[in-house]
Amino acid sequence: MSAIEERPGGACTLKTLGGREYYCTIELCLQVIGGKWKPIILWRLHMEGVRRFGELKKAMPNITQKMLTQQLRELEADGMVSRHVHPEVPPRVEYALTPLGESVIPILERMCGWGREFEKRFAPDECVVGF
Amino acid sequence: MSAIEERPGGACTLKTLGGREYYCTIELCLQVIGGKWKPIILWRLHMEGVRRFGELKKAMPNITQKMLTQQLRELEADGMVSRHVHPEVPPRVEYALTPLGESVIPILERMCGWGREFEKRFAPDECVVGF
DNA sequence: CAGAATCCTTCACGATACTG
DNA sequence: CAGTATCGTGAAGGATTCTG
């Protein structure tokens, strides 16, 4: 039982990184990949590879254009996704995971697995039939 | 490259579980352990074991009483922490991780590890000296 | 000591319209 | 097609006070 300052997540002192404030790297991680949309965007890019803006939009029916743009820009700023603009008319913009973006996939997979166990615990009937 | 409906996170259809709505189990997971405080609370209970309300409060200087109470209640409702009220005056309430609560620790550890790599990438100097 | 109750602020997220 | 630019809303989070 080590002191909180010695835990693997880092110290309990306030840190800053590129305007972000956090007390442990778990918080930092959540600031980068947390929120309502980022995990889904990252997951789709992982499963489907390079995608155009419109393809992502179509695959996520209830995200607004504004939110998709915003989240992609933030992910890009954090080096999680790459953005490639083809100089054409009409414009074509393709997004893909960077190596850094790929590196969070194991976390998302674990979260998936844990979520499934949680489903089983609280709604065993629903899950057994494979919803 | 499988269709999105076949991804390990579950289908792309809207699911509900105890009032929660989500499209994949990653979202479900984030609803249970996401947010500003829950990861920290879970992590502290993991590192320090059974803790009283006041001990948790003291260890997290900038959380308000209201938020700590609220987050603990939600974690309790999800079966992540146990709450034991000792019938004394003044009252003594002890919180601890349940087995289900312990089961998220591997995720938090991975998030910690990833956050440290992210720190290195964007602020290599600061991290090498062991901040 | 461990909260409950109340009021207040912020901001993530969304709806809509417009554009190179 | 892939965006901006506004405007608006609700929920998350916070400050303060009161209590068994």
Image: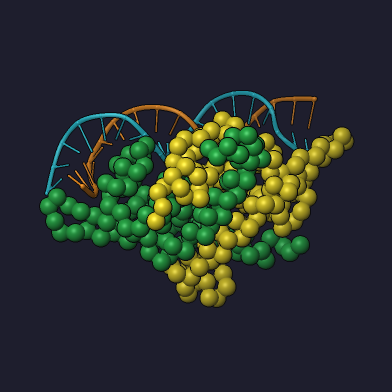
Chain colours: A green, B yellow, C cyan, D orange
Q: Residue at x 60, y 64 (%)?
A: A10
Q: Quadrant of the N terminus of chain B?
A: bottom left
Q: Residue at x 63, y 58 (%)?
A: B106
- Count of numbered tags: 0
Q: Quadrant of the C terminus of chain B?
A: bottom right
Q: Can you tell which quarter of the image residue A45 is in?
A: bottom left
> x%, y% of residue A51?
30, 54
Q: Residue furthest front?
A: A129
Q: Can you tell which quarter of the image residue A9 is in?
A: bottom right
Q: Is residue A77 visible?
A: no
Q: Nearer the viewer, residue D12 or B7?
A: B7
> x%, y% of residue A112?
54, 50
Residue D8 vertical position relative to residue B55 in the rendered view, above or below: above
> x%, y% of residue A85?
22, 58
Q: Can you tell which quarter of the image residue B67 is in?
A: top right
Q: Residue at x 12, y 52 (%)?
A: A89
Residue C18 vertical position relative to residue A37 in the rendered view, above or below: above
Q: Nearer the viewer, residue C15 or A16?
A: C15
> x%, y% of residue A111?
56, 51
Q: Residue at x 48, y 60 (%)?
A: A104
Q: Residue furthest right?
A: B88
Q: Is residue A72 visible?
A: yes
Residue B5 vertical position relative to residue D11 in the rendered view, above or below: below
Seen in the image, is B30 located left or right of residue B41? Answer: left
Q: Nearer the viewer, residue C17 or B124?
A: C17
